[in-house]
Amino acid sequence: MGKVILTGDRPTGPLHLGHYVGSLKARAEMQHTHTQYVMVADAQALTDHAKEPEKVRKNITEVCLDYLGVGLDPDVSTLFIQSQIPELFELTAYYLNLVTWNRLKHNPTVKQEIVQKGFGDAVPAGFMVYPVSQAADITAFKADLVPVGEDQRPMIEQTNEIVDKFNNTYHTGVLVRCEAHIPKMARLPGIDGQAKMSKTLGNAIYLSDDPDTIAKKVKKMYTDPGHIRVEDPGKIEGNMVFTYLDLFGTDIQKIEELKAHYQKGGLGDMVCKKYLIDVMLAFLEPIQIKRAEYTPEDAWDILQKGSEKARMRAAATLSEVKAAMGINYSILTTQNSG
């Protein structure tokens, strides 16, 4: 296969349409042309959910089922659980010695997420060092490509800093530099018009939402606040109904006719929303049918097998790393005298 991809998600909740647009669709396509490792990042999720391990555990299977629903093939992509690869934690420990605390504090992504999560002065140390943990994840599989949003680019830059520092310090070429793979549309706006669909903001449509839930969410969707009466001309720019129709609709001619009618006036928001409900149900139905073919037990079995395979790959890299550092000690045994 071609280049190596490492990608994944934190199991803090089910996956939503933003995940699909930003990465899942590309993963399903690229798995056939690349060697792909897909990680359920439970250890990373615990950096800010340490008091909710049961939530993280429950969502491991939910995330895996979503992967299977969108078409990730466990016979092609390696699906695994981060915490089940102890080599990742050992690599993190070695890399921490190559990174300054000051550098971690000034990582733009970390700074932004500290504000978003409202840590204040109580930032968990595990959260502060997760760029180093992420570098361990990426380098363990010698990933060439890492699909991320634009806001995560600084994490890839820091990974490459660690790669260069390690290779220069130990005069080796063991670690591989990686490249951020930024999708054309890395971010899907939320149903409320916010810039990003997010579990935290409560503005997401989940891949596993039932039809009633989808209908309720679409009916609450942000449109044009100036379109007060049906006969008023409406704006389609920034109108989430048309943003979603453009992304998920298949009848281009009908969508263009709706846009023209809405902009001219005489078309109510609810008519457009009812059509979008039909579009969303048609889009999500095959994903949910595929998802329903698997049980949580199936998901655990797939993740266990994938974790065993992933661990073998990570162990090989760790062995090379320790050899480069000169710390691949052998356990010496001595014979009892007499």
Image (cartoon, rainbow, N blue to C red):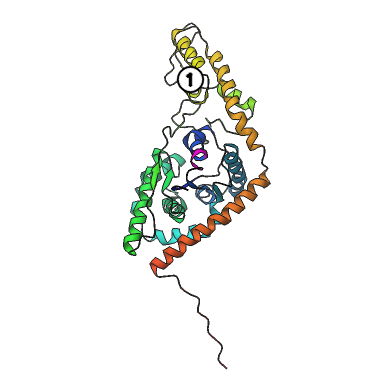
**In the rendered image, which quarter is residue 175 located in?**
bottom left
Residue 120 in view, yes or no? no
Residue 203: say if magenta. no
Residue 277 sits above or below residue 9 on the image: above
Q: Residues within 10 Å of mark 1 (few under 14, many from 20)?
A: many
**In the rendered image, which quarter is residue 152 located in?**
top left
Three-letter amino acid code of the residue under disc 1: Phe
Q: Secondary structure at mark 1?
A: helix
Residue 205 or residue 2, whichever sits in front: 2
Residue 201 sits above or below residue 45 on the image: above
Where are the magenta residues, as a range? 28-32
* Residue found 61% across the figure and 41% down from its top: 65
Residue 31: say if magenta. yes
Give the prevailing secondary structure in the magenta stretch: helix
Residue 290 or residue 111, whichever sits in front: 290
Q: Position of residue 268 (x, y in %)?
A: 52, 11
Left or right, 301 with respect to 199, comes to right
